[in-house]
Image: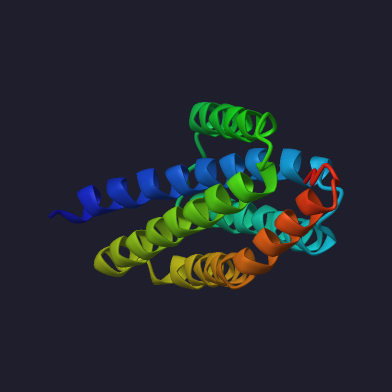
Amino acid sequence: MADNEIRDVFIVGLRNAHAMENQALSIMKPQLSRIENYPEVAAKLEQHIRETDGQIARLEEVLEGLGEDHSTFKDMALSFTGAMTAMGHTMAGDEILKNSFANFAFENFEISAYKSLLTVANAGGFTAAMTAIQTNLAEEEAMAKWLDDNLAAVTRKFLMLREEGATAKV
């Protein structure tokens, strides 16, 4: 593949990652605003929202370094779908569980996207971008691990709250 084709693939991948992170924010922020009975989940979401803001900034820096910009259209489209996903879960009696499943799946999607971006960056010799992408990847892996490690505890708490007659609201 020619260098300019690899660059094109890399730019599209960076723009997609930027939009993906905006989608993540549109999923997490509504979840956070609804959490009442799961302070540990709220704290982790707050932390990851801050990380996601940093990931977006890093992606913008990489794009700017290549003389490119993010795609406003992709950002808006994916943010809209993320917001709709989050809203759909609010009607479920087990909203916290559905959010946990969806968040874990989304984190793994992000992990795959960043691993692919690293491969393209390596193939195209975009070494200046590698640290930013690796940092984003590490944060996504940490969040996925936390979600995986805490799913049983969140589920048990959900069951306990339901048994006590609490609303088990997120």
Q: Is residue 39 left or right of residue 66?
A: right
Residue 52 horizontal/vertical position (percent): 65, 55
- The scheme the figure's colours follow is rainbow
Q: Front-most of 34 and 78?
A: 34
In the rendered view of the protein, which quadrant contains the N terminus?
bottom left
Q: Quadrant of residue 55?
A: bottom right
Q: Is 97 above or below relative to 129?
A: above
Residue at 48% over, 53% down: 105
Residue at 59% over, 33% down: 79
Q: Quadrant of residue 72?
A: top right
Residue 59 horizontal/vertical position (percent): 54, 54
Q: Front-most of 112 and 75?
A: 112
Total numbered circles: 0
Residue situated furthest left in the rendering? 1
Q: Is 159 above or below relative to 79?
A: below
Q: Is residue 143 left or right of residue 7?
A: right
Residue 96 horizontal/vertical position (percent): 69, 48
Residue at 30% over, 66% down: 119
Residue 126 horizontal/vertical position (percent): 37, 65
Residue at 54% over, 72% down: 138
Q: Is residue 22 left or right of residue 122?
A: right
Q: Is 75 above or below relative to 128?
A: above
